[in-house]
Image: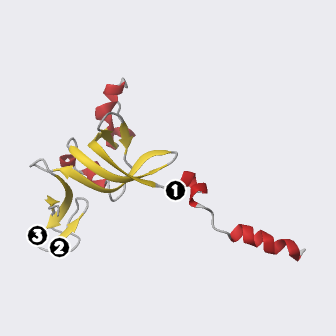
Amino acid sequence: MIAWIVPALVVALSPIPADEVAGGGPETVTLRGEVVRLVEVLGSFGVPEQQGPIEGQVVLRKEGGGVVPLLYNVGSRAFFEDDRLRDRPAELVARTMEGLPYLQVVSARVEDGSGELRTPEYYCDICTISVRYDQPCPCCQSPMELRYTPED
């Protein structure tokens, strides 16, 4: 009876290759386009104007056509909450997962007023703290200012 336990434990405890887990694991991609609200692009696909839960959904309208919805996470939160970052050229570094038609944004660069792609941040001049999405300063609770980080 005990003879089958050791082989069973070896099989059960052996690591599963990444390509056998959830379609091979996430892939990191860099995509360019404009981040817009989903309801703004539905008309171009012949879908009547929508309201309800999808009103807040944002998508990347890719260069060359097509749209990809963004998951709401730390990397994409500013696009959901700040109108100033949408409807302008952007470059997203994101993770894609096989079978999931959403992008998980890792980092983003958005065209600033001078036409350069730069990383948006929210900055507190008092505490010299920067964060990735608009919020009161975590230190002094003052409003934070949208600015773009200089690129090296």
Which residue, given by chain and number where applicable, does mark 2 sit on?
A: 140
How does the figure colour the protein chain or chains?
A: secondary structure
Q: CA distance from mark 2 to mark 3?
A: 11 Å
**Crowd class of label 1 (few under 14; some 14 to 19; many from 20; radius 10 Å):** some
Q: Tell me where residue 36 appears, x and y as whole percent.
A: 27, 40
Disc with the residue nearer the chain's start (1 vs 2): 1
Position in image of residue 35 (x %, y %): 27, 43
Residue 113: assigned label = none
When the figure is inspected, residue 63 is found, relative to residue 85, above or below; the finding is above
Q: Please, is residue 8 above or below residue 104 in the view?
A: below
The quadrant of the rendering that contains the N terminus is: bottom right
> Image height check: is 40 above or below 81?
above
Q: Quadrant of residue 3?
A: bottom right
Residue at the location (57% across, 56% down)?
19
Q: Position of residue 105 (x, y in %)?
A: 35, 54
The amino acid type found where label 1 is placed reads Gly
Viewer-side residue, 152 vs 99: 152
Location of mark 1 (residue): 25
Residue nearest the observer in this picture, 12 or 47: 12
Task: Say which of 149 and 20 sits in front.
Answer: 20
Q: Mark 1 or mark 3: which comes first in sequence?
A: 1
Q: Which residue is mark 3?
A: 125
